[in-house]
Image (spheres, rainbow, N blue to C red):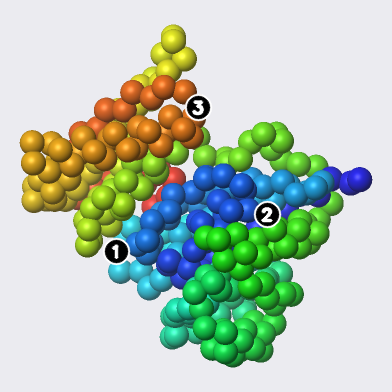
Amino acid sequence: MTERCGLIAIVGAPNAGKSTLVNALVGQKVAIVSPKAQTTRVRLMGIALEGEAQLLLVDTPGIFDPKRRLDRAMVAAAWGGAEGADLIALVIDAKAPGGARLDALLETLAARHEPKVVILNKVDIATKEPMLVLASKLQQVLDPQAIYFVSAATGDGVADLKARLAAAMPDGPWHFPEDQVSDATERMQAAEVTREQLYLQLHAELPYASAVETEKYEERRDGSVAIHQQILVARDTQKAIILGAKGSRLKEIGSRARTALEELMGRKVHLFLHVKVSPKWEEDRGLYREIGLDWVE
């Protein structure tokens, strides 16, 4: 049989479940997930196999109304990930589709030339009648090639979706080895895993007001890896929250991140974290390069 390979841009509003869907399609975790919106900041490619097809899944940041430079860079990354894709897959939370924000997103997508499909996610917790009304509206406004109903969290409908996406891919050689599941470097994955713990363990706005920078990544002779990271925040009060009483919170963040990294990398990880107050970290061009975002004026 002929090999097929194509790029699928996964786009949508924050918290639609894009990262969970990418992980489900790949069959293992390649993108960080949290209950909070706007978890994904960078374009991250998950690589899924289905029969003779290789699916290059670009998990993009959620598309929202940007207020800060970092927000603008994230939205630019989302639309950049869709540029020239073989297929744009719009993921929508079927339980809470987004109202005016969704309308604005549909208007932008309708003007794009790339083929499109719609994936209504979280159908396991959505009400049937409003969901069918939404599907009818989406068909009229966007005229997608197909509308799929799935639950990325439970796996319902994911296998059928994966098969249909594979069938839509163009003929062509695979771009990556069979056993590769992501194009992200281990250095970038390490920063993402630590940032995931910030989202999971801290509350309110603090995770959004921080960044994780991998300062040093050292392969050791015994096969283990030593990773030195700094967590950047803007104020001393934020640093105190991350540290916790006598450093207990930072220790817990590091412990859980290290466990996740060892599972991801399949080897021993020595993780060293420290917190740095940098009032203007969002204006650091070098940091944007480190975390995989373009500088946006």
- Foreground pick, 113 / 126: 126
Crowding at dot 1, Cα within 10 Å, few <14 / some 14-19 / many 20+, comes out as few
Residue extending farthest top: 221
Quickly name the residue at label 1.
Answer: 68
| Label 1: which secondary element | loop
Q: Give the spatial CA distance, label 2 vs label 1.
A: 29 Å
Callout 2–callout 3 Cβ contact below 8 Å? no
Amino acid beneath label 1: Arg
- Which label number is shown at residue 266? 3
Mark number for residue 7? 2
Q: Position of residue 33 (x, y in %)?
A: 43, 53
Question: Which mark is first along the chain, 3 or 2?
Answer: 2
Give the class, few, some or many, for how many residues have Cα within 10 Å of label 2's Cα (few <14, many ≥20): many
- Residue 58, picture quadrant: bottom right
Percent coordinates x, y for residue 108 in the rendering: 55, 77
Q: Image height check: is 185 above or below 123?
A: above
At label 3, counting other C-alpha atoms closer than 10 Å, the crowd grade (few under 14, some 14-19, many 20 or more) is few
Taking the image as shown, residue 85 lies to the left or right of residue 203, namely right
User: Going from the N terminus, do you reach mark 2 or mark 1 first?
Assistant: 2
Residue 1 screen position, x and y as percent:
91, 45
Front disc: 3 or 1 = 3
Residue 246 seen by the camera: yes
Amino acid found under the numbered disc labelled 2: Leu
Residue found at x 52% / y 83%: 127
